[in-house]
Image (spheres, rainbow, N blue to C red):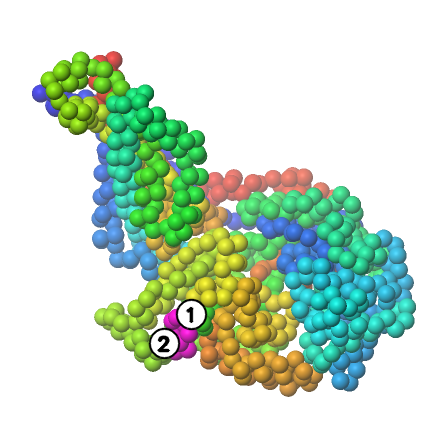
Amino acid sequence: MRSRSFLVVPSLLAAGACNTPFPAPIAEGHPGDATPRRGGTLHLGSFADIHGLDPAVTSDDLAASIIEELFAGLVDYDASAQIVPDLAERYETSDDGKVYRFFLRQGVRFHDGSELTAPDVKRSIERALHPTTPNPAASFYDTIAGYGAYTQGTAAHLDGVVVEGRYVVAIRLRETDARFLSVFALHGLRPVCPSAGDRYDDAWQPCGAGPYKLAPGDWDRGRSLRLTRHEGYFRPGLPHIDAISWTFGMNRASELYAFEDGALDLTHDLGDTELQALRADPRWAPFLAPEPDRIIDGEVMNTELPPFDNVEVRRAVAAAIDRDHYRAYKPESLSPNAQALPPAVPGFDPRFDGQHYDYAAALAHMAKAGYPYDPRTRVGGYPGVVPYYLMRQGSTEYTAQILAQELAKIGIRLELHLVSWPTFLSLAYRRGTVAMADPGWAMDYPDPSDFFEALFSSKAINEEQSTNTAFYRSARVDDLIERARHELDREKRMALFTEANHIVCDDAPWAFTVSRRLEDVVQPYVRGFKPHPVWTFHVANAWLDRASSASTRRELGQAFPPFLRSARASAAW
Amino acid sequence: MRRSLAFQRFVANRAAVAGVGVVVSLAVFAIVVPWVASHDPWTSDFARGVAATGGPVGPSRDFPLGADRIFRDELVRLAYGARLSLLIALSATVLSSLVGGLVGVASGYYEGRAPDMVLMRVVDVGLAFPFLLLVMAIGAALGKTSPGTLLVVLGLTGWLGSARIVRAKTIQIRSADFIAASRALGQTTGQILLLHVLPNVLGPITVLATLSVAQMIVAESVLSYLGAGVAPPTPTWGHMLLEGQDSVMMAPWLLVAPALAILTSVVGFNLLGEGLRDLLDPGRAGAR
C-alpha cells in the first residue's frame, strides 16, 4: 500500500507529459450534405458576462455577438467584412460624400410585430445620441449635421437625419467623412422597436429587427440568456436554428469539459495547450476555426513621462524586443507584429517591416539617448527604474516578464506593478500616470481609422479615459489622419494611412509586439458556421446536424470524464 | 543528564524526527539548488525550454521539473521560491513571536489591570478579523508588495493567537510560589519578568513559533496565489501555483511541483512543532 502512494507524483507528471488526448468528436448526421436543416438549440458559453443588450450603450465584445442577432442594421458587415445593405434594400452616396440616402425594405417587422419605417430609424438614432444616453461610441458619429447642437441639448432633434418618405431616410454630414459608413454599420445606431421610445431606459426589454428575439424572462442576468427565432425575420427561411442558449461566467476548465461533453457547441475560450492538442489531433483539426487577427498588442510608452519623452529611448525599446519571444509564449494565438495595424485590418502591409528586433541598433539608440550601456560589464543604461503596470492574471503577466528580460539587456530596469482590472483601466488611460503598459487595442470596425484616430491622434488625448495612452502628439500624423477622413478615394486614403504607419513606427510611441487572434472550436455537427470578421459568433446562417437527438456525449452513452482519461494515460505510462 | 533524556525522547518521536528531516532537506534544497543549477530563475531559455509542440518542455535532464510558461527552469524557481517563502515565513514568525511574547507576558503579568484590558481588547478585535482578509487589506493599503513589506505585514498580524496563550501561561507562572519568593527578596518587576517569567514561557513560544512557520508559509502562498504577494518575476510558491493552474491540463507538473513544496514544508514544520511540544511540555511528557 505504502509504495503506491509514492507513484502518485510520477503518474500525475506523466499524465501531463502524455498530452491528454481528447475524445473523438461527436459526429454530424449527414456528412457531405450541405442542405441546411431547421431546428435545435445552439449552446454557447463564456467565462465573461454581459452588462447590457441595448445597442445604444453597449460596446463589449461578448454583448456584440448577441446584439448582432437581436438588432439588424440598415447596413451590416458581411462574412468578408464588406459593408452591405441589410434592412436597407439599397443606399446611395452623394458625390461629395456628405449625404447617405437609405431605401428601406418594405414589410420588415420588429420582434413586437410593428413595421420598420423611416421615422423608426430617425427615432432610434436620436435615442442613441441623446445627451442622456450613456453611449460610449457617440463620438463615432460626430460628423452628422447638427450633432453638436443635439448632443449638447440645444436642439430638440438631430438635423442631419431626415425622413424623406415612409421608407427613405437620409443622413447628412457636416463634412466628408470617409469612415462614416464603417461606423454606421456598427451597432450603435441600429433601429429599435417603438417600445424603446425616444430616450434610453435601463429597464427596456431589448427588441429589434434581428433574426433572434429575447422573450421576457429569458435573460437571467449574470448566468444565462436564451434567444429564440424571430418568426417575422425579413430573410425568408432564416435563421435555421430555433434557439441560442448562452451561459455566462463559466470557469474555463468547466467550459472545456462542457465542450468535450457536447453540452457546448462552440467555444473560443480554450487555452493554448488545449488548442495545440486539438490541432495535433487529425479528428479535431478540421474543426478549429481561427478568428481574424484583429487585436494588436504593444508596449505603450508614455511620451510625456521620462525616460520615454526621449524618442531615442523609445526607438531602443522597439528594437530591443524580439517578437518571436512573445510569440513563443502563446504560439497558437500570437503572431509577431511590427506595425500599427493587425493583419485583418485594411491598410496592414505584410511587407512593411516597421519595427524589428535589432540588438545593436537598440544599444546605439540608448547611446544616442544619453544612456550608453555595455552588455559585457552591465554598466550604464537608464539610471532609474521604470514602473510597468499590468493587470493580474492576464497574458501580459507573462509578456511583461519577457519584456523585462529584453529591456534588461539594453540597460532599462522594469518594476512590475500588478493591479486589478478596474485599477488598470483607471490608471492606464489617465494622463501623466503610467510610464509603460500594454493595454492592447482590438478592432471596432475594419478600417485603419479605428486604430490611428484612437491611438495616435492628439485629439484622442484626454485627462481621463484617453485612448491615446502614449499621449503621443505628431502634427504630421494628425494632418494625415485628418486628410484621410476627407479622402473618398480608397487608394489615396490607404496611402495616407501607410505614411502615418511609417511615422508612428519610427516615432515609436508603441513598441508593437504581436497581433492576437482567438481560435474557435466548433462541434462537427454545427454546420455553415465561420467566425464572423466583426461579430465573431454570428450564427444566423448556421444549422445543427446531429447524428442523434441526444444532446450530450453522456446521453449518447459515450461518457468519458477527462480526469478518467488522465488516469488512463498515466496507467499506460 | 536531562539533556540526553530530552534528546532520547525527541529521537523516539519518529514524527518529530521526520519533521526535522523535512525542514533540513528544505533548507538544503533552498540553499544548494540555485547554487549548482545551470539556469537562473529569471531568464527564459527560448532554445532548450521549448518543446517540439511549442509549449514548455516537460521534466527532462536539462529541466528536471520542466520549464514554466515562459521557459524558465521550474526547479530553480522552486528553490528560489523556497528561499523566499522560508525567509518570509521565518522572519515573520520571529517578529510575531516577539510581539506576541511581549504582549502576552505584559498582559498576563498585569492581569485584570489597565494594560491587560487594553492589550486583550486589541487582540480580540484583531482575532475577530479573518486573518487573510486583514493581511490583504494591509497589503493593498501599502500598494507595492516586496518581500520586506510582506514579512512585516504577516509578522504584525500573526502575533494575536500566541499573545493569548503566552498570557495564560504567564498568569499561571505569576501565581507560583517562586515568584512570590523573588518578590519577597526585593526583585523588581523587570527582573521577575526577565529572569523568571520569560524563561518559563519560552517553551510554549518556541512550539507556537514552529507551528506558526507553517501557517506563515501558507499565508504567503495564499497572498501570492491571489496576486497580492510579491510581484513577478520574483518566484514565490503561491504565484507559481497560480501560473501552474492555467496549464494544469497539459503541463500539470507546473501545478504539482509548487503544491507539493507547500504541502511538504507545512507538514514538516507541523511535525517538528508537535515534536517540540512533546519535548518541552513537561505535563504532556509526564502523562506518557
Work out whether residue A352 or residue B102 is closer to the camera in this orientation and state it.
B102
Q: What residue is pinned by disc 2? A: A362
Magenta span includes A294: no
Which type of secondary structure does the marked residue at label 2 adopt? Answer: helix
- Where is residue A107 shown, x and y percent of the image? 90, 63
Work out whether residue B80 or residue A560 is closer to the camera in this orientation and state it.
B80
Image vertical order of residue B21 relative to residue A95, above or below: above
Q: Residue A305's mark?
A: 1
Question: Residue at left 86%, top 62%?
Answer: A116
- Where is residue A290 shown, x and y percent of the image? 60, 63
- Where is residue A263 shown, x and y percent of the image? 65, 45
Give the left or right position of residue A471, taking residue B185 as reference.
right
Regarding residue A467, the answer to whether it shows in the image is: yes
The image quarter containing residue B94 is: top left
Secondary structure mostly seen in the magenta stretch? loop
Give the left or right position of residue B198, taking residue A232 as reference.
left
Image vertical order of residue A384 relative to residue B232, above or below: below
Question: Residue at left 67%, top 56%?
Answer: A63
Magenta span includes A311: yes
How crowded is the residue under tag 2: few (<14 C-alpha within 10 Å), some, or many (20+)?
A: many
Amino acid under disc 2: Ala
Amino acid under disc 1: Leu
Q: Earlier in the sequence, mark 1 or mark 2?
A: 1
Q: Which residues are magenta?
A: A305-314
Pointer 2 chain: A
Q: Residue B159's mark?
A: none
Give the left or right position of residue B189, taking residue A414 as reference.
left
Image vertical order of residue A84 relative to residue A30, above or below: below
- Where is residue B177 shown, x and y percent of the image? 18, 13
Residue sitting farthest toward the left: B1
